[in-house]
């Protein structure tokens, strides 16, 4: 099982969420304007490469999902963040060959101002945890 498979499960959940969430994986194309959800993924074991099977000691795998809910205002970022929360929280994803636990929210920040491009956007960050063990 790969890190990518876990990330793909989360991407699929959010892409299928009601209301057509615009979900981006790690980069924002220049022509994309808010609202959108930008995702970053980090596994708990830095020695596990993105495309290498999980091996070694622990059979439990932990993936953290950093969800940036980006909107044109604080209210828009909060609303988008709540849509992400509704889609992910307590959901049990499907990852082939793994038994997944319900997704949990670990941390978050209120919307932060970003005006470096000359246009105001607000970015709310929430951190979710996905854990799995061999099936």
Image (cartoon, rainbow, N blue to C red):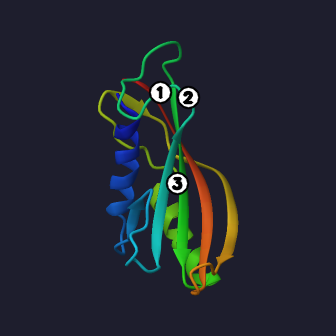
Taking the image as drawn, is residue 79 in sight?
Answer: no
Q: Residues within 10 Å of mark 1 (few under 14, many from 20)?
A: some
Indicate the quadrant where residue 82 lies. bottom right
Q: Quadrant of the N terminus?
A: top left
Tell me how far mark 1 sits from mark 3, CA to CA.
25 Å
Q: Residue 122: x percent and y percent? A: 61, 77
Dot 1: element: loop
Residue bearing mark 3:
89
Residue visible at 43% across and 67% down? 28
Q: Disc 1 vs disc 2: Cβ atoms closer than 8 Å?
A: yes
Using the image, tell me which numbered label, if any, was put on residue 81.
none
Dot 2: element: loop
Q: Disc 1 vs disc 3: Cβ atoms closer than 8 Å?
A: no
- Residue 118 position (above or below residue 17): below
Q: Quadrant of the C terminus?
A: top left
Left-right relation of 66 to 49: right
Q: Which mark lies nearer to you, 1 or 3?
A: 1
Q: Which mark lies nearer to you, 3 or 2?
A: 2
Using the image, tell me which numbered label, if any, was put on residue 45.
2
User: Toward the viewer: 56 or 104?
Assistant: 56
Residue bearing mark 1:
48
Quick one: which residue is furthest to the top in this view? 57
- Residue 132 position (above or below residue 87): above
Indicate the quadrant where residue 99 lies. top left
Residue visible at 35% across and 32% down? 51
Q: Residues within 10 Å of mark 2 (few under 14, many from 20)?
A: few
Q: Reading the chain from its start, which is encountered first: label 1 or label 3?
A: 1
Q: Residue 2: x percent and y percent? A: 36, 31
Dot 3: element: loop
Q: Residue 104: x percent and y percent? A: 57, 47
Left-right relation of 52 to 127: left
């Amino acid at each position: 099982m790969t890190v990518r498979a876990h990330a793909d499960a989360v991407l699929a959940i959010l892409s299928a969420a009601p209301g057509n969430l615009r979900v981006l994986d790690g980069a924002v194309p220049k022509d994309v304007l808010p609202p959108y959800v930008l995702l970053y993924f980090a596994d708990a074991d830095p020695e596990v490469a993105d495309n290498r099977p999980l091996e070694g000691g622990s059979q439990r795998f932990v993936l953290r999902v950093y969800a940036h809910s980006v909107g044109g205002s604080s209210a828009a970022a909060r609303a988008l963040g709540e849509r992400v929360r509704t889609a992910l929280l307590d959901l049990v994803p499907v990852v082939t060959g793994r038994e997944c636990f319900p997704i949990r929210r670990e941390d978050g920040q209120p919307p932060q101002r970003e005006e470096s491009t000359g246009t105001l956007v607000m970015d709310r960050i929430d951190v979710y945890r996905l854990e799995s063990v061999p099936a």
